[in-house]
Image (tube, rainbow, N blue to C red):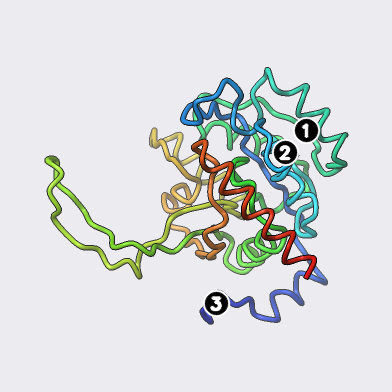
Amino acid sequence: MKKPSQLLPAYLRLKAAFHRPKTAAVILAGGQGTRMGTDTTKQLLMLDGKPVLVHTLLAFEKCKMIDEIVTVVRPSEKEIIALWCKEYGIQKCRTLVTGGDTRQMSAENGVATVSSGISYVAIHDAARCLITPEQITRVVLWAYAYHAASAVTTVVDTVKTVNARDFITETIDRKKIRLAATPQVFHLPYYQAAVKLAEEKGVSVTDDNALMELIGQRVKAVDTGYENFKITHPEDILRAETILRKRREDAHE
């Protein structure tokens, strides 16, 4: 059962139904995925009969909150991804953009190409391919309310800090800890202002929530559960296939 703070107020859904800001998804699919130990990048690996990236794109294609999709890709993979968009009917995928040297640069490249009239951007890792349209909707609606929202996962293990010699120094209250996930959704002018400030200060970040922190903008944390994990290691494919099979079984019951 979700906590009251995670339940979407009815007025948010009502407001979005009558006046919804245009929102673009920026899918980051330019990574090398070296930890998979395969010659094929993880976004191109097959998962339950479809490429990992296609599972991700279909979730955003089916989400009514998303008006267009910009996919950030490796130059060598542009052709095959363009073919998949046609094959799987991903009509919202407006453009394929070449990624930068870092995740931060790739996100900026993608956001820079969204259509005029876009008010919000939902930045998402292609390897988080089990995200659902319903989860995307929740994060986007919270972003409409607070100008910034991020998918997160709660922590179940006890969290410790260690020193330089790997001796435990402190126990952290896990109730205050969240693992950052995606999508991370921001009001476009806020994101643009944060990117500009980061460039001026020479700040490098590993997720886009840190850009909001840089300008003092609060980000609403939205729990999307443990199934919204990133495909990183070979065993993650088997785990993801098990989850997809269970979803199909539940849908048939």
Percent across and percent down for residue 219 are: 50, 61
Q: Name the residue under label 3.
A: 2
Q: Mark 2 points at which residue?
A: 70
Element class at badge 2: strand
The residue located at (80%, 59%) in the rendering is 64
Residue type, label 2:
Val
Residue 235 at what x, y percent from top left?
A: 51, 41
Mark pair 3, 2: CA separation: 31 Å
Q: The N terminus appears in which quarter of the rendering?
A: bottom right
At label 3, which amino acid type do we have?
Lys
Tags 1 and 2 touching, CB below 8 Å: yes
Dot 1 falls on a residue whose secondary structure is strand
Residue beneath disc 1: 95
Mark 3 or 2: the one toward you: 3
Disc 3: CA contacts within 10 A as few (<14), some (14-19) or many (>=20): few
Q: How crowded is mark 1: few (under 14 residues within 10 Å), some or many (20 or more)?
A: some
